[in-house]
Amino acid sequence: MYNPSFKKRVAVLRGGPSDEYDVSMQTGAGVLRALSDSPFETQDIVISKKGEWLSRGFVKTPEQALLNSDVVFIALHGAYGEDGTVQRILERLSLPFTGSNSFASAIAINKALTKDHLKKHSTSILMPPHMKLSKQESPNLIQHVATIKELFGPEYVIKPIGGGSSIGTVLTNQYDLYKNIVAALEQYDEILVEKRIQGKEATVGVIENYREKKYYSLPAIEIVPPSSAQFFSADVKYTGETEEICPGRFTRDEKEELMNAAKLVHEILGLAQYSRSDFVVANDGVYFLEVNTLPGLTTESLFPKSIEAVGGSYKELVTHLISTASR
């Protein structure tokens, strides 16, 4: 049990066996810097790409690495960190941790499950038409491609079911659809094919129990990728090339719709503490794309920028998440 006469001991988990290892290392470094002159004692735990837990350079079991920890800050992204795996380990150890629980994380990282869950519980969230495909369906792929072309129009987005940072996401047209689906299924077991919605890209953060509000929606950020990129792809996410306008250049009604939709997604999926939802603002409405249960906290990340836009700070955000972490 935590003794108030000592500093609260915070274990920061970063790295991990996912495509977002490098981004996670940067997020974790940012968190550790923010806590360097705080009333917390920190422990830097790096999870290798092989899934090994490293504390002070030594490989340890999760139980050994977290033996003296009071709370865990999950600075992981993608598989293992956002899919419920590490959350189940921490739940088993009865340790408070930042972010959502294992069940909500497992749903939210799966883009198809997320859309199905939202559709089941809300009629107000607009989403692009989509089809889930897996390697097992390869024998019927020509038929599926024909159906997609007939129902979704001439332009599409192909993305892996799990993961984030737009890694593996490809834009394509009807002429290259088949070959791009084949290429995606060679790399991933399951993929999602969506109708491409044209419009302004936007993202909205939600933080719980902030400024006396249970769900506090942060300002909608408008994302304007460089002319060399077709969308906010992994190649331009952390290079500083993308223009991120906060608050975004949206109408009052669009801002309200974005903020309400982000809160609704967070609530319906049973997420905890914070999340960031991505949207496209089109002529016919605001379309939800996906949600991030552990948004990036690097110097180029969107969530810290939206906190700063309302007068908060990175350090305040990190401290708030630690102080409100639960089992």
Image (cartoon, helix red, strand yellow):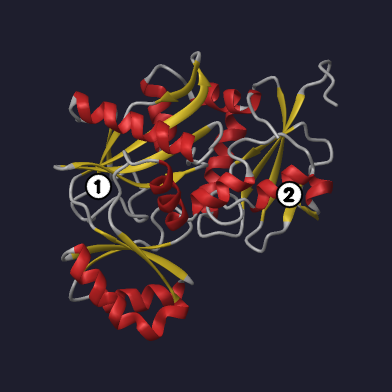
Which residue appears farthest toward the bottom when viewing the image? 139
Q: Quadrant of residue 154?
A: bottom left
Circle 1 or circle 2, nearest the eye: 2
Q: Horizontal and vertical percent for residue 137? A: 42, 79
- Residue at point 22% right, 75% down? 176
The residue at 59%/28% (across/down) is 321
Find residue 243 and report its horizontal and vertical position in percent.
Answer: 26, 39
Q: Which residue is painted at 29% across and 82% down in the image? A: 142
Which mark, residue 136? none
Q: Give the mark count.
A: 2
Dot 1 amino acid type: Pro
Which residue is denoted by mark 2 in the rendering? 89
Give the secondary structure at mark 2.
Answer: helix
Residue reaching furthest to the top: 212
- Give the quarter of the image for residue 202: top left
Residue 82 in view, yes or no: no
Q: Is residue 265 above or below residue 62?
A: above
Residue under label 1, please give it.
225
Sequence order check, earlier mark of 1 and 2: 2
Residue 185 shows in the view: yes
Given the image, on which type of amino acid does mark 2 rest?
Answer: Ile
Side of 239 relative to 187 (left or right): left
